[in-house]
Amino acid sequence: MDENELIQSARKGDLDSFNQVILKYQDLVFQRAFWILGEAESADDAAQETFIKAYRNLSRYRNGSFRAWLLRIATNTCYDELRRRKRSQDISFIQHDAHGEQIDLLDYLADPESSIERAIDELELQADIITHIKGLSSEFRETLILVDILDSTYEEAAQVLGVPMGTVKSRLARARLQLRALIDPLQDVTPHSHLPSSISIGY
């Protein structure tokens, strides 16, 4: 069955169908939660809660982008957790994976044919990118993460953030310009439509 058929089946109480949907989106939801909460264990808990909420509220899904609908639930779940902790909504970057092992947040794999010096330079550049993303204002950071890191469309990002699509485009353009201004002194980086795909957290 395709995604819509699986969702329709899940609406009728077929948990196996919904589990297939979970398999498709579990990495995406975990990454979204990790970018907000900054902790693998907390992100894992938030991802599980997101899918529970999604299953319980399938009747409210109105056949738009299920991906965007799910990301919005994940986002709200994470910010509910931050409010519960009475913490700021700033992102914390903790370099540990879901098993507690220390990792490179960028999950960067250097080209085996590259020189060691070049690999080190590229790693340092991407580490700087992460740092600068963290320093953006929340509205710019959220937009940048959704579009350039989680590969959401403008329409999906608009649904997740609850703003018009034009606002998403405007924020994204300004976020990229701010990021470029911060990165340019280190290396001449032209703002592409997407940031390096290696800026991700695996589940």
Image (cartoon, rainbow, N blue to C red):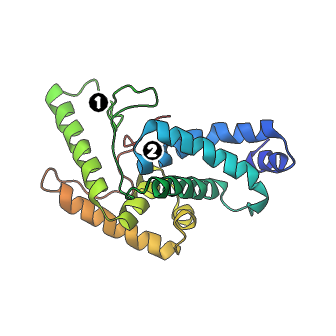
Circle 2 residue? 34
Residue that appears at 14% across and 50% down: 186
Closer to the camera: disc 2 or disc 1?
2
Note whether residue 113 is visible. yes
Note whether residue 201 is visible. no
In the displayed structure, 119 sits above or below 197; it is: above
In terms of image quadrants, where is residue 87?
Answer: bottom left
**Label 2 crowd (10 A; few <14 / some 14-19 / many >=20):** many
Front-most of residues 44 and 154: 44
Residue that appears at 45% across and 52% down: 85
Residue type pointed to by label 2: Phe
Across and down, in percent, residue 63 comes to: 74, 61
**Label 1 crowd (10 A; few <14 / some 14-19 / many >=20):** some
Residue type pointed to by label 1: Ala
Q: Are marks 2 and 1 in contact (CB under 8 Å)?
A: no
Circle 1 residue? 110
Of helix, strand and loop, which one carries label 1?
loop
Residue that appears at 14% across and 30% down: 117
Extreme residue toward the right, this view: 12
Residue that appears at 69% across and 62% down: 64
Across and down, in percent, residue 61 comes to: 73, 60
